[in-house]
Amino acid sequence: MEIDRRSLRNLISKRRNEIEQAVEGTGYLARTVIGVGTFLLDNEVNLDLLPAKQLATFEKFLNPLLEKPNNRTD
């Protein structure tokens, strides 16, 4: 799976409200999801470095938001 670095950076810096809406009522914290995104950015967006729990968080919250059409507002 290839992740666009610019889209991920945009999501965690300018679209935090979408992350907050996605986690609402799930028991997850937005800052946890943002932390997973930040970790990925700091590590060349290498999903192999994520432990299973963080990978599940990425797949549940960040990946669907990254796949939304017209998600860039650069």
Image (tube, rainbow, N blue to C red):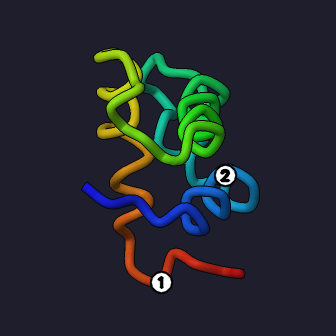
**Is residue 38 shown above or below 71?**
above
52 is higher (above) or lower (below) than 68: above
Which residue lies under the disc numbered 1?
A: 70
Q: Which mark is residue 21?
A: none
| Secondary-structure class at tag 1 | loop
Q: Are marks 2 and 1 in contact (CB under 8 Å)?
A: no
Q: Which residue is mark 2?
A: 17
Question: Image point 71% across, 81% down: which residue?
Answer: 74
Residue 49 as seen in the image, left or right of residue 5:
left
Judge from the rendering whether residue 14 lies leftward or rightward of residue 61; answer left or right: right
Q: From the viewer's perspective, is residue 16 above or below residue 74?
A: above
Residue drawn at x 54%, y 39% is 40
Q: Quadrant of the N terminus?
A: bottom left
In percent of width and height, residue 55 lies at 33, 28
Q: How many marks?
A: 2
Question: How much space separates mark 2 and mark 1, taking CA atoms?
Answer: 16 Å
Residue count near mark 1 (Cα–Cα under 10 Å), binned few <14, some 14–19, many ≥20: few
Residue 63: give x, y in percent of width and height: 36, 51
The residue drawn where x is 58% and y is 54% is 18
Amino acid at circle 1? Asn
Residue type, mark 2 in image: Asn
Residue lying at 63% horizontally and 29% vertically, measured from the top left: 35
Q: Position of residue 9 (x, y in %)?
A: 65, 57
Residue closest to the eye, 34 or 46: 46
Camera-near label (2 vs 1) is: 1
Pick the front one: 41 or 32: 41
Q: Position of residue 3 (x, y in %)?
A: 40, 59
Label 2, secondary structure: give it.
helix
Residue 57, located in which quarter of the rendered image? top left
Neighbor class of circle 2 (other Cα within 10 Å; few <14, some 14-19, many 20+) is few
